[in-house]
Image (cartoon, rainbow, N blue to C red):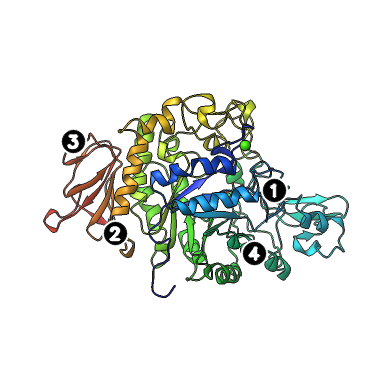
Amino acid sequence: MGDEQPWWRDAVGYEVYIRSFADSNGDGIGDLRGLLNRLDHLAWLGVDICWITPFYPSPQADFGYDVADYCDVDPVYGTLDDFDAVVARAHELGLRIVVDQVPNHSSDQHPWFRQARSSPDDPRRDWYLWRDPAPDGGPPNNWVSHFGGPAWSLDEASGQYYCHLFLPEQPDLNWRNPEVRDAFDDIFRFWLDRGVDGFRIDTAHLMMKHPDLPSNPQLAPVDASASHIEQWLSLDHRFDSVQPENHEIYRRWNAITSAYESMLIGETYVFDADQWNDLLGPEHELDLGFWFLSMWMPWDADAVRRVLEGPRPPGRSRAGWVLSSHDQHRPATRFGGGESGRRRALALSTLWLGLPGVPFLYQGEELALEDGIVPTEAKADPVGFADDPTSGRDGCRTPMPWEPGVAQGFSTTVDCWLPPGHTDADTVAAQRADEGSFLHRYRQLLAVRRGLTGLAEADMVIDQDGSVITVQRDDVAFVVNMGPDPVPCRGAILYRTDPDGSADVIAADEAMIIRMSSRFGSPAGRSSRRG
Ligand code: NOJ
Ligand code: CA
Protein backbone atom coordinates (compact mmCIF):
# COMPACT_ATOMS: atom_id res chain seq x y z
CA MET A 1 0.00 0.00 0.00
CA GLY A 2 3.07 2.28 0.19
CA ASP A 3 2.45 5.69 1.79
CA GLU A 4 -1.17 5.70 0.76
CA GLN A 5 -3.77 5.65 3.51
CA PRO A 6 -5.59 2.31 3.78
CA TRP A 7 -9.14 2.34 2.45
CA TRP A 8 -10.68 2.27 5.92
CA ARG A 9 -8.90 5.39 7.22
CA ASP A 10 -11.91 7.70 6.58
CA ALA A 11 -14.60 5.04 6.72
CA VAL A 12 -17.70 4.67 8.88
CA GLY A 13 -18.88 1.17 9.74
CA TYR A 14 -22.33 -0.27 10.33
CA GLU A 15 -22.99 -3.48 12.24
CA VAL A 16 -25.64 -5.84 10.90
CA TYR A 17 -26.84 -8.34 13.49
CA ILE A 18 -27.94 -10.79 10.82
CA ARG A 19 -30.57 -12.58 12.90
CA SER A 20 -32.49 -9.35 13.46
CA PHE A 21 -31.89 -7.28 10.34
CA ALA A 22 -34.31 -8.53 7.68
CA ASP A 23 -36.08 -11.85 7.11
CA SER A 24 -36.61 -12.86 3.46
CA ASN A 25 -38.50 -16.15 3.88
CA GLY A 26 -40.99 -15.56 6.67
CA ASP A 27 -39.46 -17.86 9.29
CA GLY A 28 -39.04 -14.95 11.70
CA ILE A 29 -35.23 -14.99 11.55
CA GLY A 30 -33.12 -12.50 9.62
CA ASP A 31 -31.00 -13.90 6.79
CA LEU A 32 -28.57 -13.02 4.01
CA ARG A 33 -31.27 -12.55 1.33
CA GLY A 34 -33.02 -10.19 3.72
CA LEU A 35 -29.80 -8.22 4.06
CA LEU A 36 -29.34 -8.24 0.29
CA ASN A 37 -32.79 -6.71 -0.16
CA ARG A 38 -31.99 -3.96 2.34
CA LEU A 39 -28.40 -3.08 1.45
CA ASP A 40 -29.63 0.05 -0.31
CA HIS A 41 -30.54 1.45 3.09
CA LEU A 42 -26.87 1.41 4.13
CA ALA A 43 -25.79 3.13 0.92
CA TRP A 44 -28.57 5.73 1.30
CA LEU A 45 -27.57 6.33 4.92
CA GLY A 46 -23.97 6.94 3.88
CA VAL A 47 -21.88 4.35 5.69
CA ASP A 48 -18.92 2.59 4.09
CA ILE A 49 -18.53 -0.76 5.83
CA CYS A 50 -21.11 -3.43 6.52
CA TRP A 51 -19.97 -5.80 9.29
CA ILE A 52 -22.14 -8.92 9.36
CA THR A 53 -22.31 -10.96 12.59
CA PRO A 54 -21.78 -14.75 12.29
CA PHE A 55 -23.95 -16.56 9.73
CA TYR A 56 -21.96 -19.81 9.81
CA PRO A 57 -23.46 -23.23 10.62
CA SER A 58 -24.11 -23.17 14.33
CA PRO A 59 -26.37 -24.73 16.95
CA GLN A 60 -27.07 -21.09 17.95
CA ALA A 61 -26.34 -21.61 21.64
CA ASP A 62 -24.86 -18.08 21.51
CA PHE A 63 -26.69 -17.10 18.31
CA GLY A 64 -23.85 -17.83 15.92
CA TYR A 65 -20.83 -17.14 18.14
CA ASP A 66 -20.68 -20.93 18.54
CA VAL A 67 -19.42 -21.92 15.09
CA ALA A 68 -19.74 -25.53 13.90
CA ASP A 69 -18.23 -24.92 10.44
CA TYR A 70 -16.17 -21.83 9.68
CA CYS A 71 -16.45 -22.13 5.90
CA ASP A 72 -20.15 -22.36 5.16
CA VAL A 73 -23.49 -20.65 5.76
CA ASP A 74 -26.10 -21.93 8.19
CA PRO A 75 -29.26 -22.89 6.24
CA VAL A 76 -31.22 -20.57 8.56
CA TYR A 77 -29.25 -17.67 7.10
CA GLY A 78 -29.02 -18.89 3.48
CA THR A 79 -26.30 -20.32 1.28
CA LEU A 80 -22.81 -19.46 0.09
CA ASP A 81 -24.44 -18.22 -3.13
CA ASP A 82 -26.53 -15.79 -1.08
CA PHE A 83 -23.36 -14.60 0.62
CA ASP A 84 -21.68 -14.07 -2.74
CA ALA A 85 -24.71 -12.08 -3.88
CA VAL A 86 -24.44 -9.87 -0.78
CA VAL A 87 -20.75 -9.20 -1.48
CA ALA A 88 -21.39 -8.46 -5.16
CA ARG A 89 -24.28 -6.06 -4.46
CA ALA A 90 -22.40 -4.36 -1.61
CA HIS A 91 -19.45 -3.74 -3.88
CA GLU A 92 -21.75 -2.32 -6.58
CA LEU A 93 -23.06 0.09 -3.96
CA GLY A 94 -19.55 1.04 -2.83
CA LEU A 95 -19.87 -0.77 0.48
CA ARG A 96 -17.17 -2.99 2.01
CA ILE A 97 -18.06 -6.28 3.66
CA VAL A 98 -16.51 -7.29 6.98
CA VAL A 99 -17.30 -10.74 8.38
CA ASP A 100 -16.99 -12.01 11.91
CA GLN A 101 -14.14 -14.37 12.72
CA VAL A 102 -14.53 -16.32 15.97
CA PRO A 103 -11.11 -17.80 16.79
CA ASN A 104 -11.17 -18.12 20.58
CA HIS A 105 -13.74 -20.90 20.67
CA SER A 106 -15.77 -23.11 18.39
CA SER A 107 -19.08 -24.80 19.00
CA ASP A 108 -19.00 -28.03 20.99
CA GLN A 109 -20.70 -29.47 17.88
CA HIS A 110 -17.79 -28.55 15.60
CA PRO A 111 -16.26 -31.79 14.24
CA TRP A 112 -12.95 -30.65 15.74
CA PHE A 113 -14.37 -30.70 19.25
CA ARG A 114 -16.39 -33.86 18.70
CA GLN A 115 -13.18 -35.60 17.72
CA ALA A 116 -11.21 -34.02 20.56
CA ARG A 117 -13.84 -35.19 22.99
CA SER A 118 -13.96 -38.72 21.58
CA SER A 119 -10.74 -39.80 23.35
CA PRO A 120 -7.75 -38.33 25.23
CA ASP A 121 -5.62 -40.00 22.53
CA ASP A 122 -7.41 -38.42 19.60
CA PRO A 123 -5.06 -36.32 17.45
CA ARG A 124 -7.48 -33.39 17.83
CA ARG A 125 -7.51 -33.60 21.65
CA ASP A 126 -4.82 -30.94 21.94
CA TRP A 127 -6.78 -28.50 19.73
CA TYR A 128 -8.70 -27.58 22.91
CA LEU A 129 -7.69 -26.98 26.54
CA TRP A 130 -8.07 -30.10 28.68
CA ARG A 131 -6.89 -30.55 32.24
CA ASP A 132 -7.27 -33.08 35.03
CA PRO A 133 -9.45 -32.04 37.96
CA ALA A 134 -7.97 -30.26 40.96
CA PRO A 135 -7.15 -32.62 43.91
CA ASP A 136 -10.66 -32.00 45.32
CA GLY A 137 -12.18 -33.11 42.01
CA GLY A 138 -13.25 -29.54 41.12
CA PRO A 139 -12.15 -27.40 38.17
CA PRO A 140 -8.37 -27.15 37.58
CA ASN A 141 -8.23 -23.40 38.34
CA ASN A 142 -10.45 -20.48 39.43
CA TRP A 143 -11.20 -19.04 35.99
CA VAL A 144 -14.78 -17.90 35.44
CA SER A 145 -16.85 -17.75 32.29
CA HIS A 146 -17.85 -14.32 30.93
CA PHE A 147 -21.39 -15.63 31.16
CA GLY A 148 -21.14 -16.58 34.85
CA GLY A 149 -20.03 -19.76 36.64
CA PRO A 150 -16.75 -21.64 36.22
CA ALA A 151 -14.86 -21.55 32.93
CA TRP A 152 -14.48 -25.35 33.06
CA SER A 153 -16.89 -28.20 32.35
CA LEU A 154 -16.27 -31.82 33.23
CA ASP A 155 -16.25 -34.33 30.41
CA GLU A 156 -17.61 -37.34 32.30
CA ALA A 157 -16.28 -39.89 29.81
CA SER A 158 -12.61 -38.97 30.19
CA GLY A 159 -12.78 -37.44 33.65
CA GLN A 160 -11.04 -34.29 32.38
CA TYR A 161 -12.27 -30.73 32.32
CA TYR A 162 -12.28 -28.52 29.21
CA CYS A 163 -11.98 -24.75 29.28
CA HIS A 164 -14.64 -22.33 28.00
CA LEU A 165 -14.41 -18.62 28.67
CA PHE A 166 -18.04 -18.36 27.48
CA LEU A 167 -20.78 -21.04 27.43
CA PRO A 168 -19.96 -24.76 27.94
CA GLU A 169 -21.13 -25.07 24.30
CA GLN A 170 -18.21 -22.79 23.30
CA PRO A 171 -14.99 -24.70 24.12
CA ASP A 172 -11.80 -22.63 23.85
CA LEU A 173 -9.31 -23.60 21.17
CA ASN A 174 -5.66 -24.16 22.05
CA TRP A 175 -3.81 -21.42 20.15
CA ARG A 176 -0.46 -22.87 21.23
CA ASN A 177 -1.14 -25.76 18.87
CA PRO A 178 0.35 -24.95 15.41
CA GLU A 179 -2.37 -26.95 13.65
CA VAL A 180 -5.03 -24.64 15.05
CA ARG A 181 -3.12 -21.66 13.65
CA ASP A 182 -2.84 -23.31 10.24
CA ALA A 183 -6.55 -24.14 10.22
CA PHE A 184 -7.46 -20.49 10.80
CA ASP A 185 -5.06 -19.29 8.09
CA ASP A 186 -7.10 -21.38 5.68
CA ILE A 187 -10.38 -19.96 7.01
CA PHE A 188 -9.14 -16.40 6.44
CA ARG A 189 -8.15 -17.30 2.88
CA PHE A 190 -11.48 -18.99 2.20
CA TRP A 191 -13.41 -15.76 2.90
CA LEU A 192 -10.78 -13.49 1.33
CA ASP A 193 -11.09 -15.48 -1.88
CA ARG A 194 -14.85 -14.87 -1.76
CA GLY A 195 -14.17 -11.14 -1.76
CA VAL A 196 -14.56 -9.98 1.83
CA ASP A 197 -12.88 -6.71 2.74
CA GLY A 198 -12.16 -7.42 6.37
CA PHE A 199 -12.71 -9.38 9.55
CA ARG A 200 -14.03 -8.42 12.94
CA ILE A 201 -12.14 -10.64 15.35
CA ASP A 202 -14.31 -11.86 18.19
CA THR A 203 -12.65 -11.56 21.63
CA ALA A 204 -9.29 -10.82 20.03
CA HIS A 205 -7.63 -10.44 23.45
CA LEU A 206 -8.41 -13.96 24.68
CA MET A 207 -6.92 -16.53 22.29
CA MET A 208 -3.63 -17.17 24.11
CA LYS A 209 -3.66 -18.27 27.72
CA HIS A 210 -0.71 -18.54 30.08
CA PRO A 211 0.92 -21.91 29.24
CA ASP A 212 0.52 -23.17 32.83
CA LEU A 213 -3.12 -22.05 33.16
CA PRO A 214 -2.56 -20.72 36.74
CA SER A 215 -5.45 -19.39 38.82
CA ASN A 216 -6.07 -15.68 38.40
CA PRO A 217 -5.47 -13.40 41.40
CA GLN A 218 -8.76 -12.87 43.16
CA LEU A 219 -9.87 -9.25 43.64
CA ALA A 220 -13.13 -10.01 45.46
CA PRO A 221 -15.11 -13.14 46.31
CA VAL A 222 -16.95 -14.45 43.24
CA ASP A 223 -20.64 -14.04 44.02
CA ALA A 224 -22.55 -16.63 41.99
CA SER A 225 -25.75 -14.56 42.31
CA ALA A 226 -24.13 -11.40 40.90
CA SER A 227 -24.33 -10.38 37.24
CA HIS A 228 -21.94 -12.16 34.88
CA ILE A 229 -19.85 -9.03 34.40
CA GLU A 230 -19.49 -8.54 38.17
CA GLN A 231 -18.39 -12.16 38.52
CA TRP A 232 -15.87 -11.66 35.72
CA LEU A 233 -14.53 -8.48 37.33
CA SER A 234 -13.93 -10.29 40.64
CA LEU A 235 -10.69 -11.65 39.17
CA ASP A 236 -7.55 -10.02 37.81
CA HIS A 237 -7.44 -11.64 34.35
CA ARG A 238 -3.68 -11.92 34.30
CA PHE A 239 -3.50 -15.45 32.98
CA ASP A 240 -6.55 -15.93 30.76
CA SER A 241 -6.50 -12.64 28.86
CA VAL A 242 -4.15 -10.24 26.96
CA GLN A 243 -1.14 -12.59 26.87
CA PRO A 244 1.79 -11.08 24.91
CA GLU A 245 1.85 -14.04 22.50
CA ASN A 246 -1.42 -12.81 20.96
CA HIS A 247 0.71 -10.36 18.98
CA GLU A 248 2.40 -13.21 17.08
CA ILE A 249 -1.02 -14.30 15.95
CA TYR A 250 -2.09 -10.81 14.89
CA ARG A 251 1.10 -10.46 12.81
CA ARG A 252 0.52 -13.81 11.19
CA TRP A 253 -3.05 -12.88 10.23
CA ASN A 254 -2.05 -9.43 9.01
CA ALA A 255 0.49 -11.01 6.66
CA ILE A 256 -2.42 -12.90 5.10
CA THR A 257 -5.07 -10.16 5.07
CA SER A 258 -2.84 -7.28 3.99
CA ALA A 259 -1.96 -9.14 0.79
CA TYR A 260 -5.66 -8.72 -0.06
CA GLU A 261 -5.81 -5.10 1.26
CA SER A 262 -8.27 -6.45 3.75
CA MET A 263 -8.80 -5.10 7.26
CA LEU A 264 -8.63 -6.67 10.73
CA ILE A 265 -10.65 -5.05 13.49
CA GLY A 266 -10.30 -6.65 16.90
CA GLU A 267 -12.92 -6.92 19.58
CA THR A 268 -10.27 -5.67 22.00
CA TYR A 269 -12.57 -5.75 25.00
CA VAL A 270 -10.41 -4.41 27.82
CA PHE A 271 -11.34 -1.39 29.91
CA ASP A 272 -7.84 -0.39 31.02
CA ALA A 273 -6.41 2.23 28.65
CA ASP A 274 -2.78 1.11 29.01
CA GLN A 275 -3.78 -2.46 28.32
CA TRP A 276 -5.84 -1.39 25.30
CA ASN A 277 -2.99 0.62 23.80
CA ASP A 278 -0.60 -2.34 24.27
CA LEU A 279 -3.10 -4.75 22.84
CA LEU A 280 -3.50 -2.74 19.68
CA GLY A 281 0.27 -2.96 19.28
CA PRO A 282 2.24 -1.58 16.36
CA GLU A 283 1.01 -1.54 12.76
CA HIS A 284 0.81 -4.79 10.79
CA GLU A 285 -1.05 -6.49 13.61
CA LEU A 286 -4.69 -5.61 14.22
CA ASP A 287 -5.41 -2.73 11.85
CA LEU A 288 -8.10 -1.42 14.18
CA GLY A 289 -9.39 -2.27 17.64
CA PHE A 290 -12.72 -1.47 19.24
CA TRP A 291 -12.55 0.64 22.40
CA PHE A 292 -15.51 -0.41 24.51
CA LEU A 293 -15.33 1.68 27.66
CA SER A 294 -17.92 3.88 25.92
CA MET A 295 -20.47 1.09 26.28
CA TRP A 296 -20.41 1.45 30.06
CA MET A 297 -20.23 5.25 30.22
CA PRO A 298 -23.08 7.20 31.82
CA TRP A 299 -24.34 10.55 30.50
CA ASP A 300 -21.63 12.48 32.31
CA ALA A 301 -18.99 14.80 30.89
CA ASP A 302 -16.15 13.54 33.12
CA ALA A 303 -16.91 9.96 32.11
CA VAL A 304 -17.00 10.89 28.42
CA ARG A 305 -13.66 12.69 28.68
CA ARG A 306 -12.10 9.65 30.35
CA VAL A 307 -13.36 7.44 27.53
CA LEU A 308 -12.01 9.81 24.88
CA GLU A 309 -8.62 9.92 26.57
CA GLY A 310 -8.23 6.11 26.55
CA PRO A 311 -6.82 5.47 23.07
CA ARG A 312 -3.55 7.42 22.74
CA PRO A 313 -1.44 8.38 19.73
CA PRO A 314 -0.19 6.80 17.61
CA GLY A 315 -2.79 4.06 18.09
CA ARG A 316 -5.84 6.25 18.45
CA SER A 317 -6.30 6.71 14.71
CA ARG A 318 -6.71 2.90 14.77
CA ALA A 319 -9.55 2.94 17.30
CA GLY A 320 -12.99 1.61 16.44
CA TRP A 321 -15.41 3.95 18.23
CA VAL A 322 -18.83 2.69 19.22
CA LEU A 323 -21.80 3.63 21.37
CA SER A 324 -23.83 0.57 20.53
CA SER A 325 -23.69 -3.11 19.57
CA HIS A 326 -25.62 -6.38 19.81
CA ASP A 327 -24.11 -6.90 23.30
CA GLN A 328 -25.18 -3.81 25.18
CA HIS A 329 -28.28 -1.75 25.97
CA ARG A 330 -28.90 0.84 23.29
CA PRO A 331 -27.48 4.33 24.00
CA ALA A 332 -30.91 6.03 23.92
CA THR A 333 -31.92 3.69 26.75
CA ARG A 334 -28.65 4.02 28.66
CA PHE A 335 -28.81 7.81 28.50
CA GLY A 336 -32.22 8.01 30.14
CA GLY A 337 -34.68 6.86 27.49
CA GLY A 338 -37.51 8.83 25.91
CA GLU A 339 -36.97 11.85 23.69
CA SER A 340 -34.12 13.08 25.86
CA GLY A 341 -32.31 9.72 25.71
CA ARG A 342 -32.66 9.73 21.94
CA ARG A 343 -31.35 13.31 21.61
CA ARG A 344 -28.41 12.42 23.83
CA ALA A 345 -27.60 9.36 21.72
CA LEU A 346 -27.48 11.51 18.56
CA ALA A 347 -25.47 14.19 20.37
CA LEU A 348 -22.78 11.72 21.43
CA SER A 349 -22.78 10.13 17.97
CA THR A 350 -21.91 13.58 16.65
CA LEU A 351 -18.87 13.64 18.91
CA TRP A 352 -18.00 10.02 18.11
CA LEU A 353 -18.10 10.68 14.38
CA GLY A 354 -15.50 13.38 14.91
CA LEU A 355 -12.88 11.12 16.47
CA PRO A 356 -9.72 9.94 14.72
CA GLY A 357 -10.35 6.30 13.86
CA VAL A 358 -13.31 4.38 12.50
CA PRO A 359 -16.72 4.86 14.10
CA PHE A 360 -19.32 2.09 13.83
CA LEU A 361 -23.09 2.41 14.10
CA TYR A 362 -25.18 -0.57 15.13
CA GLN A 363 -28.37 -1.29 13.16
CA GLY A 364 -31.20 0.89 14.42
CA GLU A 365 -28.86 3.43 15.99
CA GLU A 366 -29.64 5.69 13.00
CA LEU A 367 -33.28 5.53 14.13
CA ALA A 368 -32.23 6.50 17.69
CA LEU A 369 -34.00 3.35 18.86
CA GLU A 370 -34.34 2.54 22.50
CA ASP A 371 -34.10 -1.11 23.56
CA GLY A 372 -36.99 -3.18 22.29
CA ILE A 373 -39.42 -4.60 24.82
CA VAL A 374 -38.99 -8.34 25.40
CA PRO A 375 -41.32 -9.95 27.96
CA THR A 376 -39.63 -12.51 30.21
CA GLU A 377 -41.40 -15.43 28.50
CA ALA A 378 -39.93 -14.37 25.13
CA LYS A 379 -36.35 -13.98 26.32
CA ALA A 380 -33.74 -15.81 24.23
CA ASP A 381 -30.31 -14.70 25.40
CA PRO A 382 -28.45 -17.30 27.47
CA VAL A 383 -26.91 -14.35 29.36
CA GLY A 384 -28.65 -12.38 32.11
CA PHE A 385 -31.29 -13.08 34.70
CA ALA A 386 -34.24 -15.04 33.28
CA ASP A 387 -36.78 -13.25 35.48
CA ASP A 388 -35.64 -9.72 34.59
CA PRO A 389 -36.82 -8.53 31.17
CA THR A 390 -34.22 -5.77 31.01
CA SER A 391 -31.21 -7.94 31.83
CA GLY A 392 -29.21 -9.65 29.10
CA ARG A 393 -28.86 -8.68 25.46
CA ASP A 394 -32.31 -9.29 24.00
CA GLY A 395 -33.45 -5.66 24.20
CA CYS A 396 -30.82 -4.43 21.75
CA ARG A 397 -31.42 -7.40 19.44
CA THR A 398 -35.13 -7.03 18.67
CA PRO A 399 -35.95 -6.97 14.95
CA MET A 400 -35.03 -3.91 12.90
CA PRO A 401 -38.23 -1.90 12.22
CA TRP A 402 -38.50 -1.18 8.48
CA GLU A 403 -42.06 -0.06 7.80
CA PRO A 404 -45.47 0.01 9.48
CA GLY A 405 -47.30 -3.32 9.31
CA VAL A 406 -46.64 -6.94 10.26
CA ALA A 407 -43.45 -7.20 12.34
CA GLN A 408 -42.67 -3.65 11.18
CA GLY A 409 -41.52 -5.03 7.84
CA PHE A 410 -38.82 -7.25 9.37
CA SER A 411 -40.70 -10.43 8.45
CA THR A 412 -44.03 -11.58 7.09
CA THR A 413 -44.74 -13.36 10.38
CA VAL A 414 -45.31 -11.80 13.79
CA ASP A 415 -43.83 -14.94 15.26
CA CYS A 416 -40.23 -13.74 15.16
CA TRP A 417 -37.29 -15.17 17.12
CA LEU A 418 -37.53 -12.08 19.33
CA PRO A 419 -40.74 -10.05 19.37
CA PRO A 420 -40.79 -6.96 17.17
CA GLY A 421 -40.19 -4.43 19.94
CA HIS A 422 -40.66 -1.03 18.30
CA THR A 423 -43.47 1.19 17.02
CA ASP A 424 -44.58 2.13 13.52
CA ALA A 425 -43.27 5.64 14.15
CA ASP A 426 -39.80 4.19 14.80
CA THR A 427 -39.56 2.52 11.40
CA VAL A 428 -37.19 3.44 8.60
CA ALA A 429 -40.11 4.23 6.27
CA ALA A 430 -41.86 6.52 8.76
CA GLN A 431 -38.65 8.32 9.58
CA ARG A 432 -37.66 8.65 5.93
CA ALA A 433 -40.95 10.40 5.29
CA ASP A 434 -40.20 12.97 7.99
CA GLU A 435 -37.33 15.35 7.17
CA GLY A 436 -36.87 16.25 10.84
CA SER A 437 -36.57 12.64 12.02
CA PHE A 438 -33.58 11.15 13.78
CA LEU A 439 -32.88 9.10 10.66
CA HIS A 440 -32.50 12.21 8.53
CA ARG A 441 -30.37 13.86 11.20
CA TYR A 442 -28.01 10.86 11.37
CA ARG A 443 -27.82 10.79 7.58
CA GLN A 444 -27.02 14.49 7.45
CA LEU A 445 -24.37 13.98 10.14
CA LEU A 446 -22.71 11.30 8.04
CA ALA A 447 -22.84 13.55 4.98
CA VAL A 448 -21.24 16.47 6.84
CA ARG A 449 -18.52 14.20 8.17
CA ARG A 450 -17.81 12.89 4.69
CA GLY A 451 -17.44 16.46 3.47
CA LEU A 452 -14.69 17.19 6.00
CA THR A 453 -11.91 15.99 3.75
CA GLY A 454 -8.42 15.85 5.17
CA LEU A 455 -9.62 15.36 8.72
CA ALA A 456 -8.31 11.80 8.82
CA GLU A 457 -4.79 13.25 8.99
CA ALA A 458 -5.57 15.50 11.96
CA ASP A 459 -5.15 14.35 15.54
CA MET A 460 -7.55 15.61 18.19
CA VAL A 461 -7.42 17.94 21.15
CA ILE A 462 -9.94 17.06 23.85
CA ASP A 463 -11.28 19.95 25.86
CA GLN A 464 -13.66 19.94 28.80
CA ASP A 465 -15.39 23.03 30.17
CA GLY A 466 -17.71 21.79 32.88
CA SER A 467 -20.41 19.86 31.08
CA VAL A 468 -19.25 20.85 27.61
CA ILE A 469 -16.90 18.50 25.79
CA THR A 470 -15.13 19.62 22.64
CA VAL A 471 -13.02 17.57 20.29
CA GLN A 472 -11.05 19.80 18.00
CA ARG A 473 -9.32 18.64 14.84
CA ASP A 474 -7.67 21.30 12.71
CA ASP A 475 -10.22 24.11 12.50
CA VAL A 476 -13.22 21.86 13.10
CA ALA A 477 -14.75 21.41 16.53
CA PHE A 478 -17.21 18.73 17.59
CA VAL A 479 -19.00 20.04 20.67
CA VAL A 480 -21.55 18.42 22.95
CA ASN A 481 -23.39 20.11 25.79
CA MET A 482 -24.07 17.51 28.49
CA GLY A 483 -25.30 20.02 31.07
CA PRO A 484 -28.84 21.26 31.79
CA ASP A 485 -28.33 24.85 30.52
CA PRO A 486 -27.68 26.25 27.06
CA VAL A 487 -24.15 27.51 26.39
CA PRO A 488 -23.04 30.17 23.91
CA CYS A 489 -21.25 29.01 20.79
CA ARG A 490 -19.03 30.75 18.26
CA GLY A 491 -18.05 29.84 14.72
CA ALA A 492 -19.78 28.60 11.59
CA ILE A 493 -22.20 25.79 12.33
CA LEU A 494 -21.71 22.94 9.85
CA TYR A 495 -24.14 20.61 11.62
CA ARG A 496 -26.35 20.66 14.67
CA THR A 497 -28.36 17.84 16.15
CA ASP A 498 -31.37 20.09 16.74
CA PRO A 499 -32.17 21.71 13.38
CA ASP A 500 -34.64 24.10 15.04
CA GLY A 501 -32.20 25.20 17.74
CA SER A 502 -31.69 28.91 18.34
CA ALA A 503 -28.64 30.54 16.83
CA ASP A 504 -25.54 31.08 18.97
CA VAL A 505 -26.41 28.63 21.71
CA ILE A 506 -25.91 24.92 22.12
CA ALA A 507 -28.93 23.62 24.00
CA ALA A 508 -28.85 20.96 26.70
CA ASP A 509 -28.31 17.51 25.13
CA GLU A 510 -27.32 19.11 21.83
CA ALA A 511 -24.15 18.75 19.76
CA MET A 512 -22.66 20.73 16.90
CA ILE A 513 -19.91 20.57 14.35
CA ILE A 514 -18.39 24.02 14.08
CA ARG A 515 -15.79 25.48 11.75
CA MET A 516 -13.65 27.76 13.86
CA SER A 517 -12.02 30.93 12.75
CA SER A 518 -9.15 32.32 14.80
CA ARG A 519 -11.11 35.40 15.81
CA PHE A 520 -13.70 33.24 17.54
CA GLY A 521 -11.34 31.48 20.00
CA SER A 522 -12.85 28.51 21.77
CA PRO A 523 -16.11 27.25 20.19
CA ALA A 524 -18.23 27.04 23.31
CA GLY A 525 -18.42 27.98 26.96
CA ARG A 526 -16.09 30.34 28.80
CA SER A 527 -12.83 28.93 30.06
CA SER A 528 -11.16 25.83 28.80
CA ARG A 529 -9.21 22.90 30.18
CA ARG A 530 -7.07 20.87 27.86
CA GLY A 531 -7.40 17.09 28.02
C1 NOJ B 1 -18.47 -11.18 21.73
C2 NOJ B 1 -19.72 -11.19 20.92
O1 NOJ B 1 -19.98 -9.88 20.48
C3 NOJ B 1 -20.80 -11.75 21.81
O2 NOJ B 1 -22.08 -11.59 21.25
C4 NOJ B 1 -20.46 -13.19 22.08
O3 NOJ B 1 -21.41 -13.72 23.00
C5 NOJ B 1 -19.07 -13.33 22.69
N1 NOJ B 1 -18.08 -12.53 22.01
C6 NOJ B 1 -18.59 -14.76 22.62
O4 NOJ B 1 -18.28 -15.11 21.30
CA1 CA C 1 -35.36 -16.07 7.48
Residue type marked 3: Ser
* Marking on residue 57: 1
Q: Which residue is mark 3?
A: 502
Disc 3 to disc 4: CB gap under 8 Å: no
- Asked where in the image residue 135 lies, by quadrant, the reply is bottom right
Q: Earlier in the sequence, mark 1 or mark 3?
A: 1
C-alpha distance separating marks 1 and 3: 53 Å
Up/down of 286 relative to 429, above or below: below
Q: What's the CA distance linking mark 1 and mark 2?
A: 41 Å
> Which quadrant would the C terminus be assigned to in this image?
bottom left
Between discs 2 and 3, the one toward the N terminus: 2
Horizontally, is 257 left or right of 151 in the view? Answer: left
Query: How many residues crowd mark 1 within 10 Å: few (<14), some (14–19), many (20+)?
Result: many
Left or right relative to 212: residue 399: left
Q: Percent x, y for residue 213?
A: 70, 63
Whether the residues at callouts 4 and 2 have beta carbons within 8 Å, the answer is: no
Q: Is residue 447 left or right of residue 252?
A: left
Residue 402 position (above or below residue 107): above
Q: Nearer the viewer, mark 4 or mark 2?
A: 2
| Disc sitting over residue 208 in the figure | 4
How packed mark 2 is, by other alpha carbons closer than 10 Å (few <14, some 14-19, many 20 or more), is few
N-terminal-most mark, 3 or 4: 4
Measured from the top left, where is residue 95 in percent x and y?
45, 53
